[in-house]
Amino acid sequence: MNQITLTQINNAFLPAKEITDIEKFSGRKDFVSEAYNALLSEGTNIAIVGNRGIGKSSLARQIINIGQGDNGLLEKLKIYHDEKLDFLTIYFACGNSIQNTNELLNRLLTTRGCLLDWIYEIPSATKEIAQLKGGLEAPIPYTLTAKIGSDLSKETIFNSSIQSHSIETIFQNVITDLLKTKLAKNGILIVVDDFDQIKNTSGFASYLKSLATNTPGLKFCVVGVA
């Protein structure tokens, strides 16, 4: 019989990165069940809070899997389910350079791999994001050809003198525009890892409450140390 090495033991109990493989994810049935029910319920958000190293990010990755229609973990844990979810899922890990939640919203809107990849597909959303001064990895011209699906729409001219709005308003408007396109049946799920790295989170809870009312197809899952 092969002997288990110390390296294998350490990697099993102290993984260097979050666990994405369903087969390697163990227990936490109650947490998974609560998260699944939150994904089903309108106007709800998810918070994963606890000490470092207890598997918060791994749980968040499993929530992403479920949100993308993978029910393998629900079946493994024998959690009742009767449909596959279809969320547009976004994962963003905060760094300690983010000072406040306004900067977080800006990063979500202007970072490749987050919402920016989808904003370019929606002319109305592109118009909103064009109001952000700086922060874009590549400037959006006010004259561009907007691509929707596989069809190219006519060139859309954007007025460069658009009146500026607050980042909260721009974010809400962009999300509203994206939800209207029905990119995913159940809406948009944004997972923000290391949320505790943000230096000033004041006002974010009340903003989430307003988003739950005004954009019920959007869900946040925030992950952080208590």
Image (tube, rainbow, N blue to C red):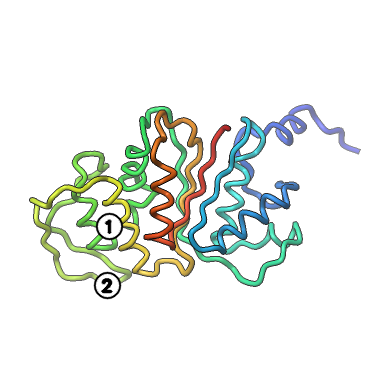
Q: Quadrant of the C terminus?
A: top right
**Label 1 close to label 2 by CB (< 8 Å):** no
Circle 2 — which element? strand
Residue in view at x 67 percent, y 56 percent: 33
Q: Considering only order in the chain, which callout, 2 or 1, is on the residue closer to the N terminus?
A: 1
76 over 10 or under it: above or below: below
What's under tag 2, amino acid-wise? Asp
Identity, as a three-letter code, of the amino acid under mark 1: Tyr
Q: Residue 186, how many percent across, how many down?
A: 48, 66
Picture coordinates of residue 69, whole percent (x, y)? 57, 64
Marks 1 and 2 sit apart, C-alpha to C-alpha, by 13 Å
Residue at the (51%, 52%) spot, across then down: 45
Q: Between residues 126 and 100, which one lies in front from this camera angle?
A: 100
Q: Quadrant of residue 88?
A: bottom left
Q: What's the mark number on residue 151?
A: 2
Image position of 69 with respect to 50: above or below: below
**Residue 14 appears in which quarter of the rendering?**
top right
Q: Quadrant of the N terminus?
A: top right
Residue 118 vertical position relative to residue 206 in the rendered view, above or below: below
At x 37%, y 64%, the residue is 179
Question: Mark 1: which secondary structure?
Answer: loop
The one of 87 and 34 positioned closer to us in this rendering = 34
Q: Which residue is identified by label 1?
A: 120
Horizontal relation, residue 108 to residue 220: left or right: left
Looking at the rendered image, the disc whose residue lies closer to the viewer, 1 or 2, is 1
Res 137 → quadrant: top left
